[in-house]
Amino acid sequence: MTAPTLELSVVLPVFNEAQSLPILWEELQAVLKTLGAAAEVIVVDDGSSDGSVDFVRLLQVSDPRVRLIRLTKNSGLSSALAAGLLASRGRIIVTLDSDLQSDPADISALLGYLDRWDAACGWRQSRRDPWLKRVSSRIANNVRVVVLDDQIHDSACSLRAMHRRCVESLELFDGFHRFIPALLRQAGHRVIAVPVHHRPRRFGVSHYGVRNRAWRAFVDMLGVRWLHLRRLRYEAREEPPRAP
């Protein structure tokens, strides 16, 4: 399988999801089968200490579409996602969490918008999270809309589909995963929010909460605003030599 023949790359950041991965793989396999596209699945392990890596290695034995990238230590979601995006070879890139809260069946719906849009981002209309997380996310989204003039309803939803040109224009920094729609729009891409399913977490606990992300997310948002304000905006053309 060579880069020119690849139609789709699915990027899966993983951190201690050994229980979720077998279920997710069955769901994802079914979706890829219906799509019928030449695809790769890039699993980026962010320093897992359970059996996540062992399961992915077993998948590699039987399925050449599976690629495994391992970070040398736990570095966070932004680093894992960036590593997967930069390693991807597909014309279309899909990102997806590995905790089963996103439904891989929604991938087909997102892909259906890419003939008219540069990126389709999931919108979790009915969140299945604890109430405190739902409230904090709603507040954060409202603040983000005001500060960044970003009309995307659910900026942090991990389920997205985008053309390769979007990946190539992303500003990568620690925390960028929370602002991908805004960063894409700032780069001139057309982004649409698409309603997707959201499921309760089945195993383990969330690695992100109000205490460990609120202030940092706010600071990152100000950084994204700064990038937007300082972005170069000019038009230029090369003129041919004039006759003497």
Image (cartoon, rainbow, N blue to C red):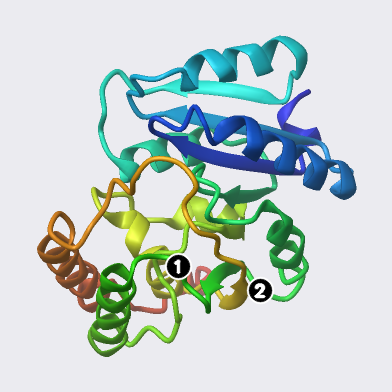
Residue corresponding to mark 1: 184
Residue at 39%, 72% in the rendered image: 182
Report if residue 244 is visible in the image: no
User: Where's residue 195, x and y in %?
Assistant: 61, 76
Instruction: Name the element at disc 2.
Output: loop
Is the residue 38 above or below the residue 143 in the image?
above
Q: Quadrant of residue 27?
A: top right
| Drawn side of residue 226 relative to residue 76, left or right | left
The image position of residue 220, as x and y in percent, is: 18, 63
* Cα distance between the residues tagged 1 and 2: 11 Å
In the image, taking residue 31 as reference, residue 34 lies left or right, namely: right
Frontmost residue, 223 versus 79: 79
Depicted 142 relative to depicted 41: above or below: below
Q: Residue at x 41, y 79 (%)?
A: 235
Q: Residue furthest top?
A: 61
112 w.r.t. 204: above or below: below
Instruction: Specify the amino acid type for callout 1.
Output: Leu
**Mark 2: few, some, or many residues within 10 Å (few <14, many ≥20)?**
some
* Element at label 1: helix
Going 55% across and 75% down the picture, which residue do you hit? 191
Counting from the top left corner in percent of width and height, residue 165 is at 57, 56
Q: Which residue is mark 2?
A: 117
